[in-house]
Structures are given as C-alpha cells and as structure tokens.
Amino acid sequence: MKKTSSRLSLILGLLSILGIAGYNSFDQWAENGTRQTGNPTVSPAENEDPERITLESTAHVAASTRSADVTDAPGLPQSSAWKAEDYAMVLAGTEIDGDLKVDENDHLIVAIGVKDFFDYFLSAVGEVTAERAMQEIQRQAAIRLPDEALSQLIDLLTDYVSYQQLMVDYMQQPLVPAEQQNYAYYAATMQQTFNQIRLLRRQVFTPETVESFFGIEETYADYAVAAMQIKADSNLSEDQREKQLNDLRSALPEQMRHSEERSRGRAETASLARQAFTEQKTEAEISEILKDHYNRSEIDGMLSALKQQAAWRGRVEEYLIIREDIVHSELAEIDK
C-alpha cells in the first residue's frame, strides 16, 4: 500500500490550493490514467520496504519549463527495441525520457536529462521493485554510454537513490495537530520544508549537480514559498496582496511565467467546471467551459471523474440517511 507522509501531502495540497503547482487532481483525472512526466511519488512493490525509495513530488510547472543544459553535445544512440510494457505496464506506449550526453573526453555531461532518465524508470517502482528499476537504468545506459561515462552515471544513480531515501525520512516527520494549523503555519512549513530539501541535496550532490538537476525546480519553490507568505500576511489588503503576487509572477523567468499562467488558467477553469457540475449544468455546457484549456480526451476524463464523485457522494448520503433511521428506531424502542 502507498505510504505518503503528512508533510508531503500538506506541501502538495498547498501548492494545488495556491494554483501554482501546475498539477492538480482534476488534471490527474483528465489524464485518465496516462503517465505524467516529472517526478511522481510512487508506491513501493508489495515485497519492498515502503521507506526504501520514493520519488520526490515536485511542481509540474518546473518540469514543463526545463530544457537540456547542453544543446551542442553529441547525442548518444537510442535503443530501437524498447517496449515499455515489457518493463512496466504503467509506462506502456511511452518512450524513454531523458537525454544522456558525453563531452569530447567521453565523460558524462551532468544535465537535467540524466535526472529525467532516472525518473522515467524509477516512476514504475510499485509495479517493479527499486532493484529492478536500477538494473534497467544501468542496462539502458550501457547501450547509450561509453564505459567511463557509464561508471559516472552509476555513481550518480547511487547518490540519487540515497537522496530519495533521505527525502523519505524527512517527509515522514509529523506535523502539529490539525487544530493547531493555520495559514501562517502552512507558510512556515513550506519554507522549512524547502529549506531542508535544499540542504539534503547539497549533502549528497556537488553544487554543479544540484544546479543541473534542481536549479529550475528551486527557482519555482522560491516562488511558491513567497506566494504562500504573501497570502498568509493578514496585514495586506486584497489589492496589496494581488499586486505583490502579480509582481512576484512577473519576476519569474519568462518560460516559467508562461507555464505558471497556463497552469493557473487550467486550475481556475477546472474549478469553474466543478461548480457548473454542482449546479447541474449539462455536459455540453461544462465542456464549453473547459475547451480553451483542455483537449477532448481530458474533458471526457474530467466528466467521468465528476460523475464518479457524485455517485460516491450519493452512496455516502444514502448510507447516512439509513444509519440515522436505524439509530432513531433503536432509540424509539428504548423509550418504549
């Protein structure tokens, strides 16, 4: 069973509420089971310690704005025989993510493509074991890299998995009781969490690797924390708050800003669609709301999810009514 820490759940939830994560549950339903690229949190295989390995969940916006750090290095041969379903059905129909490159001395170029390569295979942990994922990473890398670069990649993979284990330990730390939580606490928790993540990365990786693997992600994390702090500041008027948030967005790198705006637009549109469904609007009306931000397949996935949610709520409400009737009947018998 999937084991998700309360701290991790809080951070992901807050990012979604802020509309800055670029990835919310409605988007997830829209994908209708298709694979998300980036760093999904994965559940361990049944026979594996759930704290052994996880993939850090990160802002989808950061993932969508990444580009290779090196564009003029020679590309390496790809495997033409790759069938993802032979490795893990969760990846069926996908191609291997990432881009492995070497310099003129056959040394591995440490860029975001290496991390994407790791994450592609590790994202299947749960269906496959972590050991199986690491073996496949090494096997596929051996097809693409000369010996010296392959040795470097294996060392880096070991560091990467060690980092993920440290992340698990940290994310398992408990939060204060729910009744003691407020918006200011959430902002402070986000700040503390991202600061600790930065430290963990620098304990494991060289500064150059940190920048290559996590540079864009950390820029976005800074934005997320600052946005949360602005929203938590009770001394600001609504106009002041909105101005500061707009100024903060304007300071983002251009490509990231565009991705964030798109993400926010999708989140706002999804919220309008949920409201329209609650108001019993027709599917055609809801589709009209969504069409500028979602494709037809995504819209169909959303409509299906909304129907499933409504059906579940109906069953819960029916159960509560029946339960209340039973309780009242028993009380009436006692009064007799």
Image: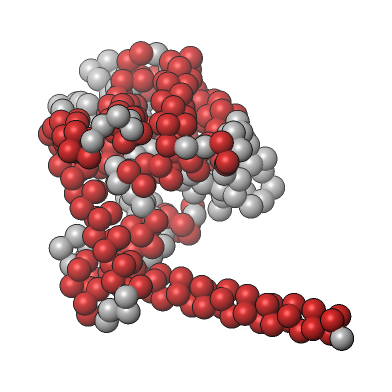
Q: Camera-side residue: 215 or 175?
A: 175
Residue at the image point whose x is 30% and y is 46% from the top: 19
Residue at the image point whose x is 56% and y is 48% from the top: 43
Residue 163 on image: x %, y %? 51, 25
- Is residue 242 toward the left or the right of residue 111 in the image? left
The quadrant of the rendering that contains the C terminus is bottom right
Work out whether 124 lies above or below 254: below
Q: Camera-side residue: 264 or 230?
A: 230
Q: Camera-side residue: 76 or 320?
A: 320
**Quadrant position of residue 198:** top left
User: Across the whole image, how many numbered discs are drawn on residues?
Assistant: 0
Residue 230 on image: x %, y %? 29, 31
Whether residue 38 can be seen here: no
Extreme-front residue of the structure: 335
Residue 69 on image: x %, y %? 22, 26
- Is residue 265 toward the left or the right of residue 60 in the image? left
Residue at the image point whose x is 31% and y is 67% from the top: 275
Residue 135 on image: x %, y %? 53, 38
Work out whether 204 lies above or below 224: above
Residue at the image point whose x is 24% and y is 48% from the top: 263
- Is residue 85 toward the left or the right of residue 264 in the image? right
**Quadrant position of residue 68:** top left
Whether residue 191 can be seen here: yes
Name the colouring of the figure. Answer: secondary structure
Work out whether 225 lies above or below 6: above
